[in-house]
Image: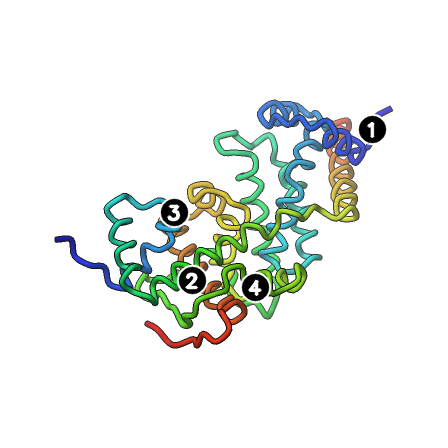
Amino acid sequence: MTPLLTCKEFLKELSEYLDDRTDADIRAKLEKHTSECPNCWVICDTTKKTIKIYKGMDQACSIPEDVHARLMAAVEKKIAAKCSDKTKV
Amino acid sequence: MIDSLAEMAVQSTQSGVFDETDLLAQARAGDVRAFSDLISHYEGKIFRLAQHITQNREDAEDVLQETFLKAYEHLEQFQGNSKFYTWIVRIAVNQALMKLRKRKTDRSVSLDEGIDTGEDIMVREIAAWDEDPEQRYSRAELNEILDSAVQSLAPTYRAVFVLRDVEELSTEETAEALELSVPAVKSRLLRARLQLRDKLTSFFKRKGDDAFAYM
């Protein structure tokens, strides 16, 4: 019979489990642990929700127009300086 | 007449075609329009990344400019062994950490600082959340909560978390961008996720559920 995981062992594997990067044997052990340990089930569920909530955070954001304009002006200045250095040489 | 960079950027956004390999080759050969296309494609991501790490809009704008200026300056040295995005992310993270270093209030500044031994994974609060916790808050309130939680992380964890879970780079790409080992990225990501989970639990826990100390 495979030994049960402790809560600390469960936590160490949690990230890899949520990223779906654990092998089948470890996955089965982790899932057995959560079915028997309500605390670890909650930690697993709320960590999953933490990851999900941040993934959706930035999707609607675009760069502000003024920031874009200043970036382009700075790069343009840099390019002009480089071109002028080359012509001097 | 030569178009300004800003005009080129607008044209490239409108064209909707993006081929990084060709653009890089053209940019390295001195094609300004190709470089402006690369900027247009990545500026939003780099600005957001800088905002997440510095937690300051002005610093983030400085980081954005410094990143693309350095990229332009060193473009000929870019070998193409990694993705262009991973390369500029590395520049941006270094610039952002330099900004933090200059802030007197922020004592933790290096990606090599504060490495855990692996024995101290902490969970302080356990309580079930609502099914859709974000529904309780407006978009602005939610962003404020999420930002303040990220800000509470040490920069060592913040950079890893933002690259992996916000910008959705792979573990290997994150390791490459931050010049860390894959096990170091995994270890920091676990701790960052658990710390954020702790912070967010106080906002998102189901009403009536008591939090209690754990391990």
| Mark 3 or 4, closer to the camera | 4
Instruction: Measure the alpha-carbon separation of dots 1 and 2.
Output: 49 Å
**Which one is in front, A23 or B189?**
A23
Where disc 1 sits, the SS reads: loop
Chain for numbered disc 1: B
Whether labels 1 and 4 share one chain:
yes
Figure quadrant of residue B43: top right
Q: CA distance from mark 1 to mark 4?
A: 41 Å
Sequence-first disc among 3 and 1? 1
**Label 3 vs label 4: CA separation?**
24 Å
Quadrant location, the C terminus of chain B = bottom left
Mark 1 and mark 2 in contact? Answer it, CB < 8 Å.
Answer: no
Label 2 chain ID: B
Q: Name the residue at 38% across, 59% down.
A: A44
Q: Residues within 10 Å of mark 2 (few under 14, many from 20)?
A: many
Residue tagged 2: B194
Q: Which circle's residue, 1 or 4, is located before the other in the chain?
A: 1
- Total labels drawn: 4
Q: What residue is shown with label 3?
A: B181
